[in-house]
Image (cartoon, rainbow, N blue to C red):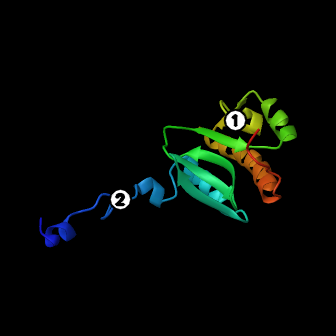
Amino acid sequence: MAAGRWSARRVRGMGSGRKTRRALSRGGSGAALRLNEAVGEWPGVKITPMFGRWGYFVGTTLFACFPVREKEYDLWVRLAPEEQARALADERIRPHRRFARRGWVELDVIEPGDVSRALRWLRRAHARASAGADTADDE
């Protein structure tokens, strides 16, 4: 083959790629949009899509995540052990299915009233992440 043919060939991973979904470019939709707008105003918070969820970070510390898709509604929040115990006393909050030992809990955010309840727990998680209280995840 001539060298000229190789230079015109499209290399996998190069080119225009996929377009950003509208929900991502707008910052989400439904409950995700309301959470992203509120949490995005807090000091030091960075919100980024990761693995089908909005990841809420302070620095490199992930303190919560919420699904990008509007049909999913389980918010994951990482709390201090004493806060996790308080949260689990609420029947609407359950231990995270895989990371409960690391302080993670799950709660559903479906109705508009659920957003304000979720924000209360997110504030606690944000405060902990801002204080640098998270340790290594090898538990």
Residue 86 left/right relative to 66: right
Residue under label 1, please give it: 99
Q: Quadrant of residue 74?
A: top right
The residue sitting at the bottom extreme is 4
| Percent position of residue 14, x then y | 32, 63
Residue under label 2, please give it: 19
| Percent position of residue 75, x then y | 63, 41
Which badge, 2 or 1, comes first in the chain's sequence?
Answer: 2
Q: Looking at the picture, does residue 2 appear above or below residue 82?
A: below
| Percent position of residue 134, x then y | 79, 50
Q: Quadrant of the C terminus?
A: top right
Is disc 2 surrounded by few (<14), some (14 to 19) or many (20+) residues within 10 Å?
A: few
Q: Looking at the picture, does residue 25 appear above or below residue 110?
A: below
Q: Between residue 56 and residue 122, name the one nearer to us.
A: 56
* Residue type for callout 2: Lys
Marks counted in the figure total 2
The residue sitting at the top extreme is 91
Is disc 1 surrounded by few (<14), some (14 to 19) or many (20+) residues within 10 Å?
A: some
Q: Secondary structure at mark 2?
A: loop
Q: Residue at x 66, y 41 (%)?
A: 76
